[in-house]
Image (cartoon, helix red, strand yellow):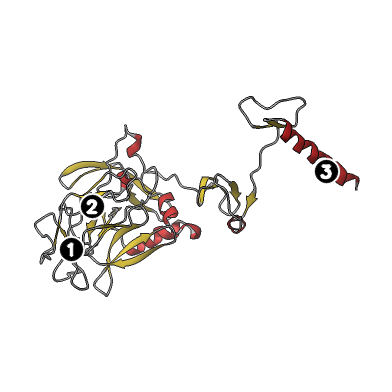
Amino acid sequence: MILIKKITLVFLIFFCSLLSYTQISISDKNSQQAHSSALLDLISDDKGFLLPRMTKSQRDNINNPEESLMIFNTDNKCIEIWVEQWYELWCFNSEEPDYWTECNDNITFTYNGSEITYRTVENPETGKCWMDRNLGAVPYNQDNSDTYEPSSNNDYNFYGDFFQWGRADDGHQKINWSCGDDSNCGNPEYGTTEDLSNTDNPGHSLFIISSSAPPFDWRSDNNNNRWNADPVENNPCPEGWRIPTEQEWANEIDSWGGDYENDQGAFLSPLRLVMSGIRNFSSGDFWHIGTHGYYWSKDVNDNNVSLMLRYNEDFAETYSGWRSYGFNVRCIKN
């Protein structure tokens, strides 16, 4: 009973101090006041401040979290903050990779008639070496930090171009991005045509739409041997680089961890994958800008369609897509 009275007295004194002062100092020293710039000042030479520590399951049971609420997630060893959803502020993992560990020198190559430079990055979980950005994304400039890495998964400078499966960098893929606050912000450099090609090289830069019937290919004969041929036909990647396989994309997803098989895992991965959406196969319009990511693989399946990576805030998976779609391309080292 005496202990309860003492605890009650301490709390009464504390709450009275909250009512009496606009600044609060909590200290294990005598007569030390809060700094004039601080509403709350914790003062100690040998003690720290502990955030609430909880598992992911416990965190998800918090009712109606307020924006800027912070916790320490004991499952992934991350300080997290709530801003419409939970975000990782900082993670403490001795095995966390250096996201920008280069696996090769910078790559300078000719893309769609111009010389550009990209960086390279390795995912130590999969051991694969990738270009650090999509084909068509802003080139790397070592004197400009804005070209070093995307600021978010909606950084349109890193969206890049939309390739139809199996086509070369003949111009059909070129997109000019100028988003600002507008999600409908992609402008194709060239228009569309409904005339299907009967060769791997249509001889023009138009985006070929296919809306009559499956398999919705930009080629009239639905030839399977393009990016997956040996040797590769129409490879838009430079020498020594290629379109990844479906399995290589699946391995990347696995490396993100079960709780992050979604757009967060895609962006937090060494590849810094963004959500540029797609160009529709039947109209040439843009879909899902800023909400989904789509990347071609070089593989096909038995239904005369090609395979790719796709993700949004809810999932990440490999899937199949009509070959007239325009998706991003990320090159992997042979």
Q: Which residue is mark 1?
A: 209
Q: Amino acid at mark 1?
A: Ile
Find out whether the residues at labels 3 and 2 contact each other: C-beta distance under 8 Å. Answer: no
Upstream in sequence: badge 1 or badge 2: 1
The picture places residue 267, in percent across and down from the top left corner, at 41, 50
* Residue 324 as seen in the image, left or right of residue 19: left
**Residue at the location (79% across, 41% down)?**
11
Mark 1 crowdedness (10 Å alpha carbons): few <14, some 14-19, many ≥20: many
Q: Residue at x 60, y 59 (%)?
A: 57
Residue 176: image x %, image y %?
23, 46
Q: Are marks 1 and 2 in contact (CB under 8 Å)?
A: no
Residue that sits furthest to the right in the current view:
2
Circle 3: residue type: Thr
Q: Is residue 169 shown above or below 324? A: above
User: Residue under circle 3?
Assistant: 8
Local SS, label 2: loop
Residue annotated with mark 2: 237
Viewer-proximal residue among 44 and 250: 44
Residue depicted at 68% across the width and 27% down the height: 34
Location of the C terminus by quadrant is bottom left
At which x and y percent is residue 170? Answer: 15, 53
Return the residue nearer the eye: 66 or 142. 66
**Is the residue marked by circle 3 packed among few (<14), some (14-19), or many (20+) residues within 10 Å?**
few
